[in-house]
Image: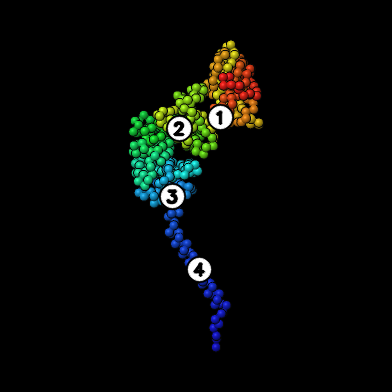
Amino acid sequence: MIVNKPNSPHKLIKVEKVYRMFHCCLLALLWISCTIDTGVAEECGEFTDLGLHHSIVGTSLDIQLLLYTRANFTCARVLSHLSPFSQPELNASRPTAFIIHGYRPTGSPPGWYEQLAHLLLERDDLNVIVVDWNRGAATLNYFAAVKNTQKVADNMTAFILKMQEHGSPLSAFHLIGVSLGAHVSGFVGANLNGSIGRITALDPAGPEFTGKPADKRLDPTDAQFVDALHTDMDALGFRKQLGHIDFYPNGGGDQPGCPRHIFAGSAYFKCDHQRSVYLFMNSINRTCDMIAYPCESYTDFLDGKCMGCDKFQGEGCPVLGYDVIKWKDTLVKLRQTKTFSSTNNWSPFCKTSYKVDIVTWNHETRWGFLTLKLHSKDQETVAKIDHKAAEFIFYTEKTLLAQFDRDLQPVERVTLSFSTGNALKPRYKLRVLRIRLTPLHSSNRPLCRHDLLLEENKEVTFRPIPCEDSNF
């Protein structure tokens, strides 16, 4: 007779295996259940990525709104046009910034949109909404994309009104439009009777908008405050003023570091145009301030005729980009202000400027160019005043603008050289009675020196001394 042993080790092992299998299955079911319940909430929205073939056949307009907040910094949420607040990350009590791109002839996503969104969130607690209208902007037919701008604006207007119904004041909206996106922003503002808080236009598009009346493009009445940044006005951008303040870095046309010939490929067409975006992003992280000087022309600015900002009543000259909002009240009263500045080829782009006052005592008038170097320990920075020949008249003070690629402190030595730029004529000498270097971006004391003899194309290095008084 066979007797079953209740504590058979083989049976216990089988029971344990069954239990483990049951336990694993239960955990798997729970994981699948959680995934099904929360998968939609955790899914990240992505900008529409199209190809050149889409541009060739054309795309029908379709708008996607991607939300970034500090709670979902790297994972965008797709917003519903009908129920914006179905996404819990969207908060009506926070200010909201919209990023609106422009024409996308190849269909690719803008390479900068996510970086711009992140910089805004690092700076302030915002709702940042990227307006993805790539289906509608991706086409070789630029005129079709232009036609879609008003439709995009109408869609955004309806969305903003729904946010307003949930408590978001119109004054808390900031529309940042790039190229065609700048005019989209203007149309949204016009739809809302200029109640939007701020519109920032980054190299607003010129083709099909130049020469149009105000209701067919961006203008200062479209928001409580409008600032425009022009970097390609001689090609893809808009030349004339569009805002309460218009920035024209490097004159608003060719930007330093951008290719000047077509053999550079796509960079030749887009580098100047996109520089506006990178200058604006640089202004958000506050690595340095890009001072903007009110002036009638870039030539006058380079000639040193626009180094004062008296009209701002002690506020100082405005800064290019994000923080210009601090000058809002004065700029709105002034209605429209045109400003100029110069930048470097690379980020952070800021230059350091000095006012140079120089008195010469050559009996005959001299024409020529100056080069200055500032030295601090083992470092140096150079400024060439060579946009045109300066006129040096006997015992007459000449004021020039010297712009250096960086700020070196303390200035221990200065190197100065003079050139006529003409190798065929005899070499001249420039006799300097006195020279004064006044920093425009800081409260550091001006630096002075007397009695220098400059032989053409030969450098003279000297140790500057603090100027004795402001009337030097």
Q: Which residue is drawn at 34% across and 37% down?
A: 193
Q: Mark 4 points at which residue?
A: 23
Distance from Cα at disc 3 to Cα at disc 1: 42 Å
Quarter of the image that includes the C terminus: top right
Q: Are there few (<14), some (14-19), or many (20+) residues within 10 Å of tag 3?
A: some
Q: Residue at x 54, y 83 (%)?
A: 4
Between circles 3 and 4, the one closer to the viewer is 3
Between 424 and 200, which is closer to the camera in this rendering?
200
Indicate which disc residue 442 carries.
1
Q: Are there few (<14), some (14-19), or many (20+) residues within 10 Å of tag 1?
A: few
Between 349 and 141, which is closer to the camera in this rendering?
349
Q: Three-letter amino acid code at disc 3?
A: Glu
Q: Say what secondary structure mark 2 lies in.
A: helix
Between circles 4 and 1, the one closer to the viewer is 1
Distance from Cα at disc 1 to Cα at disc 2: 19 Å
Distance from Cα at disc 4 to Cα at disc 2: 66 Å
- Image coords of residue 31 (percent x, y): 47, 62
Quarter of the image that includes the N terminus: bottom right
Q: Name the residue under label 2.
A: 327
**Quadrant hosting residue 447:** top right
Q: Say what secondary structure mark 3 lies in.
A: loop
**Quadrant hosting residue 448:** top right
Q: Earlier in the sequence, mark 1 or mark 2?
A: 2
Q: Three-letter amino acid code at disc 1?
A: Ser
Are discs 4 and 2 less than 8 Å apart at CB? no
- Image coords of residue 385 (percent x, y): 55, 23
Distance from Cα at disc 3 to Cα at disc 4: 36 Å
Q: Which of marks 2 and 3 is nearer the N terminus?
A: 3
